[in-house]
C-alpha cells in the first residue's frame, strides 16, 4: 500500500502503522469465505465433514436434508476450497480440506457455539 496522507492528523501515526495493510483483494477472499458460511445448513455440513468423510446420501440423512440441497451446499463449500472430494467407483466422498483455512474455520465454529469435537468427548 502506498503511504497515505490523511486529511486529519490525530497524532496516531495511523498512516505509518498501516503502511503494509493488505489489499482489497485479500479482504475480499475473507468476505467470500464468510459469504459461503452465511447459511446455517452449510456450516453444519462443513462441521460434519471436519469429523468424517461421507457421501451425499449419508450427509443428507445426517442433516435431514434432500440430496439436491446437500449437493448444492457441497458445491459451494468445494468452490471455496473448504472441502475436497474423491471418487470411489460411482460414489463420491467428501471431507474437510486439510488446509489452515478449513482448520481455522472449524475451530472458530466450535468456539463460537461452544461445542466440542466428537473425538474430544
Image (cartoon, helix red, strand yellow):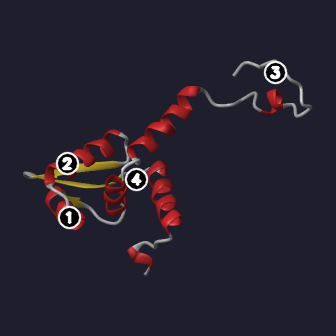
Check disc 1 and report its element: helix, strand or loop: loop
Asked if residue 61 lies left or right of residue 108, the reply is left
Q: Position of residue 57 (x, y in %)?
A: 14, 59
Q: Position of residue 36 (x, y in %)?
A: 38, 43
User: What residue sits 49% from the left and 38% below the top?
Assistant: 31
Q: Position of residue 58 (x, y in %)?
A: 17, 64
Check disc 4 and report its element: helix, strand or loop: loop
Distance in Å between CA atoms under marks 3 and 2: 48 Å
User: What residue sits 32% from the left and 63% below the top?
Assistant: 48
Kindly give the residue lying farthest to the right in the view shown.
Answer: 11
Distance in Å between CA atoms under marks 1 and 4: 26 Å
- The first of marks 3 and 4 along the sequence is 3
Q: Badge 3 is on which residue?
A: 6
Kindly give the residue lying farthest to the bottom in the view shown.
Answer: 121
Say whether marks 1 and 4 touch (CB < 8 Å).
no
Q: Badge 2 is on which residue?
A: 71
Distance in Å between CA atoms under marks 3 and 1: 53 Å
Q: Badge 4 is on which residue?
A: 98
Amino acid at each position: 500500500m502506498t503511504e497515505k496522507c490523511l486529511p486529519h492528523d490525530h497524532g496516531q501515526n495511523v498512516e505509518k502503522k498501516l503502511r503494509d495493510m493488505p489489499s482489497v483483494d485479500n479482504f475480499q477472499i475473507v468476505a467470500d469465505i464468510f459469504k459461503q458460511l452465511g447459511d446455517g445448513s452449510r456450516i453444519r455440513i462443513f462441521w460434519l465433514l471436519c469429523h468424517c468423510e461421507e457421501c451425499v446420501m449419508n450427509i443428507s440423512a445426517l442433516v435431514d436434508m434432500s440430496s439436491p440441497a446437500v449437493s448444492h451446499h457441497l458445491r459451494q463449500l468445494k468452490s471455496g476450497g473448504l472441502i475436497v472430494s474423491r471418487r470411489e467407483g460411482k460414489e463420491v466422498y467428501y471431507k474437510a480440506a486439510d488446509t489452515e483455512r478449513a482448520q481455522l474455520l472449524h475451530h472458530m465454529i466450535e468456539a463460537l457455539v461452544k461445542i466440542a469435537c466428537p473425538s474430544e468427548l
